[in-house]
Amino acid sequence: MRNRKNSTKSLVHDTDRYLQSLMATNPLQEPIMRRAIRALNLPPGSQGLDVGCGIGLQAIMLAEAVGAAGHVTGVDRSPEFLDCARSIAEKAGISEQVSFQEGDMNNLQFDDDAFDWVWSANCAGYAPGDPLPLLKELARVVKPGGSVIILAWSSQQLLPGCPVLEARLNATSSGIAPFAEGVAPERHFPRMMGWFRRAGMDEVTARTFAGDVFAPLSGEIRDALTALLGMRWVDVEAELSEEGWVEYRRLCLAESPEFILDLPDYYAFYTYSMFRGRVVG
């Protein structure tokens, strides 16, 4: 029983820490998400589904985009995330235009043709499993002529002037997560266009959105980048050389006197890629 309690406490702690990270990094994500949503030109008054909605930040932006006559349903498997999403939507004064429910993206509890479009950011498609059943499930709940839209983080330069260290960090298990060494190339996120076509969709498009930050950093952006560095490369010591580990600690830890975010000429960029396919009737 003690072990079970300790396990539960650890899970709660991990969830709380991840929630805090999502909120902290939002200032980096939100401008890109808003640009991506504007580029979609979602029909006013349309009904949409946000799969893997997390704490609801994108669901709220999507609801704003479709207007008061539209509605967005957010689905996530985490009750804690959904509670947070409802609270954020209420504070934003948009709770009538969004709703949230627990669910599994691989087995959506909705009828066929229930929505005008489906959106998923940093969730669907960004996993090492077979993408085809998932994409077919997303397309199932979209009306003919509607869209399936998938967006995820696709690249970054966070350590300017240190390309070798950043390349080595990106090659660690954490750096390539959620993929893993040995996964077939066609199952990686940048091959999404092929997944859409094999799922029976047409008019498949791709577009990449870039964000950048540079010194002097505001407190909000500095906190966001600090959280991002902590999320991006986790438990990497065993996969780095001794020299690489020293460099990582010197540059990437906020308590270091040489923390890279303190550079007077700091500059970084990051990209999200968005894929969209039309559901065929």
Image (tube, helix red, strand yellow):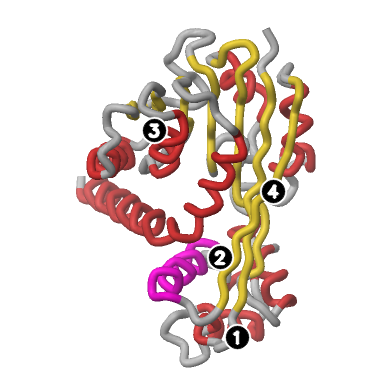
Q: Which residue position holds label 1?
A: 265
Q: Which mark is residue 195?
A: none
Q: Earlier in the sequence, mark 2 or mark 4?
A: 4
Residue at the disc numbered 3? 77
Quadrant for the N terminus in the image: top left
Distance of label 1 from label 2 (alpha carbons):
23 Å
Disc 2/disc 4 C-alpha distance (Å): 23 Å
Q: Amino acid at mark 1?
A: Asp
Residue sitting at x 43%, y 40%: 61
Q: Where is mark 4, residue-wise?
A: 208
**Amino acid on which the number 4 mark rests in the picture:** Thr
Residue 192 lies in what quarter of the image? top right
Marks 2, 4: nearer the viewer: 4
Q: Is residue 200 left or right of residue 274?
A: right
Q: CA distance from mark 4 to mark 1?
A: 26 Å
Identify the element where label 3 is drawn: loop
| Marks 1, 2: nearer the viewer | 1
Residue drawn at point x = 56 percent, y = 16 percent: 142
Sequence-earlier tag: 1 or 2: 2
